[in-house]
Image: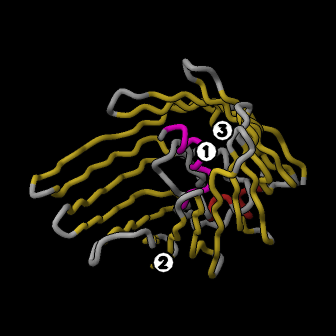
C-alpha cells in the first residue's frame, strides 16, 4: 500500500483552492521545480524524474520502469495515466472542473471504475463522495478544510447499516516553507490526499494527528495515531530531505533535487 501511495499521491484528490500565479514567480521569469525524488529504503533506492513543458508537468519516470504521463487542457490537468514496469496501464484518472475548481475525478483501473464528486461549500471548504457500490442508505463523506492554501483539517463520516459507524478527524500542522510542487501548473487543483507522504499545497505538512471513533458490529472503536514529517531545506527554503514516521513505528525517507526553469 505504501508503494501504491508513493505514486498515487500525484493524482489523488483533495484540492488546494489558492491561486498560485503570483506566488510562483520567484526570480523574474524563473521558477524552482522538482527535478528528482529519491525514495530511500533497505531494499534499494528508487529515483523518479520529473519532466516539464514550461512549468506544466508532462511525465514522471522512475528507474524501476514505472511512469506517469500527464495531459493538460489549457492550464488544467485533465488526465493522468500510470504505467507499470512492463508498459501496461495500471490506472487512469480524468479530471473535470467548474469555476476553476475540481468538480469530478474518474478513476479507471483494470477491474474497477468509479467517480468522485466534489462540492465546494466555499473557497476553504470542500466535501466529496464517490459512486462506488455501497449498501442502501450507506454514507461515506469526506470534508476538507483549508487555510492560506493549506489543508488544516479533514473529517470523514462512514456508515454501513447494521455493520459500522465511524467518524474520523485529522488535524494537520504545516510549516511556512515552500512546498516542492507549488510551482507546477494546475497541480494543486487536483492533489490533496493527505494519506500519501506528499501533498501539493502552499507549504509543507509537519504533522497529522488522527482519531477514529465509532462502533463495529456493536463493539466500540477508538483509535488515535499520527504521522510526523521531519524536513530539511535548501537555501531557497524548498524541502531537500523528508523523513516520514508514524505512531506504528514505520519510517520512510525521501530526497528531492530541483532546477530553475526559465519561462
Q: Crowdedness of circle 3 by 10 Å Cα count: few (<14), some, many (20+)?
A: few
Task: Residue at 63% x, 59% y: name it.
Answer: 188
- Between disc 3 and disc 1, the foreground one is 1
Mark identifier at residue 119: 2
Q: Is residue 74 above or below residue 24?
A: below
Verify whether residue 7 appears in magenta: yes
Q: How many marks?
A: 3
Give the image location of residue 218, x and y in percent: 9, 58
Looking at the picture, how far across and down is residue 111, in whole percent? 54, 58
Residue 228 shows in this picture: yes
| Part of the protein shown in magenta | 2-13
* Mark 1 nearby-residue class (10 Å; few <14, some 14–19, many ≥20): many
Q: Residue at 48% x, 78% y: name it.
A: 119
Q: Which residue is mark 3?
A: 237
Residue 187: which numbered mark, if any? none
* Mark 2 crowd level (few <14, some 14–19, many ≥20, 10 Å Cα): some
Mark positioned earlier in the residue sequence (2 or 1): 1
- Judge depth for marks 2 and 1 and give the one in front: 1
Amino acid at each position: 500500500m505504501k508503494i501504491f501511495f508513493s505514486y498515487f499521491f500525484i493524482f489523488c484528490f483533495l484540492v488546494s483552492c489558492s491561486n498560485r500565479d503570483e506566488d510562483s514567480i520567484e526570480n523574474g521569469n524563473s521558477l524552482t521545480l522538482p527535478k528528482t525524488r529519491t525514495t530511500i529504503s533497505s531494499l534499494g533506492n528508487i529515483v523518479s524524474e520529473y519532466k516539464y513543458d514550461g512549468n506544466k508537468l508532462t511525465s514522471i519516470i522512475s528507474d524501476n520502469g514505472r511512469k506517469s504521463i500527464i495531459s493538460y487542457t489549457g492550464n488544467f490537468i485533465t488526465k493522468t495515466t500510470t504505467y507499470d514496469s512492463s508498459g501496461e496501464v495500471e490506472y487512469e484518472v480524468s479530471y473535470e472542473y467548474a469555476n476553476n475548481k475540481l468538480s469530478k475525478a474518474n478513476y479507471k483501473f483494470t477491474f474497477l471504475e468509479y467517480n468522485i464528486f466534489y462540492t465546494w461549500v466555499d473557497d476553504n471548504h470542500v466535501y466529496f463522495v464517490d459512486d462506488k457500490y455501497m449498501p442502501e442508505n450507506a454514507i461515506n463523506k469526506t470534508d476538507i478544510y483549508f487555510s492560506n492554501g493549506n489543508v488544516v483539517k479533514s473529517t470523514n463520516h462512514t456508515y454501513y447499516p447494521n455493520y459500522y459507524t465511524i467518524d474520523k478527524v485529522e488535524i494537520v500542522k504545516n510549516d511556512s516553507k515552500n512546498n516542492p510542487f507549488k510551482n507546477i501548473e494546475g497541480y494543486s487543483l487536483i492533489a490533496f490526499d493527505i494519506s500519501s507522504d506528499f501533498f501539493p499545497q502552499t507549504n509543507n505538512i509537519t504533522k497529522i494527528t488522527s482519531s477514529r471513533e465509532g462502533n463495529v458490529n456493536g463493539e466500540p472503536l477508538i483509535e488515535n495515531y499520527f504521522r510526523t514529517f521531519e524536513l530539511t531545506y535548501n537555501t531557497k527554503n524548498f524541502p531537500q530531505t523528508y523523513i516520514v514516521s508514524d505512531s506504528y513505528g514505520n519510517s520512510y525517507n525521501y530526497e528531492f533535487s530541483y532546477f530553475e526553469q526559465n519561462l
